[in-house]
Every structure is written in C-alpha cells, then in structure tokens.
Amino acid sequence: MKTIKEEMIRDYKLKKLGYDFMGYTFNNMNELSFHHLIVPKKDSEAMGIGDGYLKWNGAILKQSTSHDYLHLIQRIDEELFLRITYQMIEENANGRLDIENLKKIRDILLYFEKEHQFDRDKKGRVLIKREYIHNRIDL
C-alpha cells in the first residue's frame, strides 16, 4: 500500500518536475516530506482525522529546505506563513503545481528574506540559511 506522500509525489509528477510545492529542488524522493497544510498534526486527532496525513491536508516539501524554512517563517511571521500556505492549498485543490502559485510563493519568500536578511537566532547563527535561498527553481 502506498503512503499519501508517495501518492502525492506520483499524482503531482514531482519526480519529473524535480521541485516541490514551494519550488525547491531535490535529487532524491527520500528528501521529501509531508507538510500538514490546513489541520496541524498536533490538532488532527482531536478533530477526528487521525494523524492528518490526508491528501487534502498536505503538501510535499523538501525536508531540509522548504519544510524547515516554512516552519521558521511560521515562528517569525505568521501572516507570511499563512500566505504561503494558502498558495499551497490552492495548488493542492487544483491537483497540480502552478507557475503562478510558485511565483507568488517566491515573492513572499523574497519579501521575508529582505525583511530578515540580517536576523540571527539566540546562538548568533543566521536565520536564513544559504540553501533556503539557492535551492529553488528560477521563475
């Protein structure tokens, strides 16, 4: 039995495209992870949808870049996180990755990067890692 992640990789032709729901490139399917879009994993059981791994509730992201980056954005700017999430919900509802959605996501990321380019975490490390900026498709 295929997992939801594997089904989504197939249905959205991610292997052929070579990029995820946010436009980040990957080399291997093992780099990809399921991101809960509408109902967070922590709230899924209480809402009666098990662990929330359902196609309508997910996006496939590269764990080490777009997935981690999106959660960083969520911690810093909830509004931008929701704007990106909305674009991925739209991609999911349309059943395909759309260049217009990807351009909107990229614009949001560029805005976030401009606003937080010099920010550092509590340990003094830059917040926006190099791979967050360089491992996405050109639009």
Image: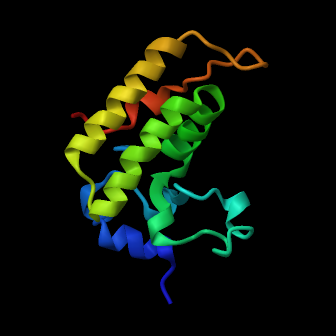
Look at the image and tell me in which quarter the C terminus lies.
top left
Q: Is residue 26 visible?
A: no
Q: What number of labels is visible?
A: 0
Looking at the image, residue 59 lies above or below residue 119:
below
Q: Nearer the viewer, residue 127 or 50?
A: 50
Point out residue 19 in the picture as x, y percentages from the top left corner.
Answer: 33, 51
Q: Nearer the viewer, residue 25 or 74?
A: 74
Q: Is residue 99 visible?
A: yes
Looking at the image, residue 70 lies above or below residue 20:
above
Q: Quadrant of residue 92?
A: bottom left
Point out residue 36 in the picture as x, y percentages from the top left corner.
Answer: 56, 58
Looking at the image, residue 134 lies above or below residue 113:
below
**Which residue appears at 28% of the width and 43% of the height?**
101
Task: Name the colour scheme.
Answer: rainbow
Point out residue 12 in the picture as x, y percentages from the top left corner.
Answer: 30, 65
Point out residue 119 in the picture as x, y percentages from the top left corner.
Answer: 62, 13
**Which residue appears at 48% of the width and 84% of the height?**
2
Outermost residue toward the top?
118
**Which residue appears at 46% of the width and 19% of the height?**
113
**Which residue appears at 47% of the width and 52% of the height?**
61
Q: Is residue 50 left or right of residue 3?
A: right
Q: Is residue 40 left or right of residue 56?
A: right
Q: Nearer the viewer, residue 138 or 94?
A: 94
Outermost residue toward the front?
47
Q: Is residue 39 left or right of residue 43?
A: left
Outermost residue toward the right?
123
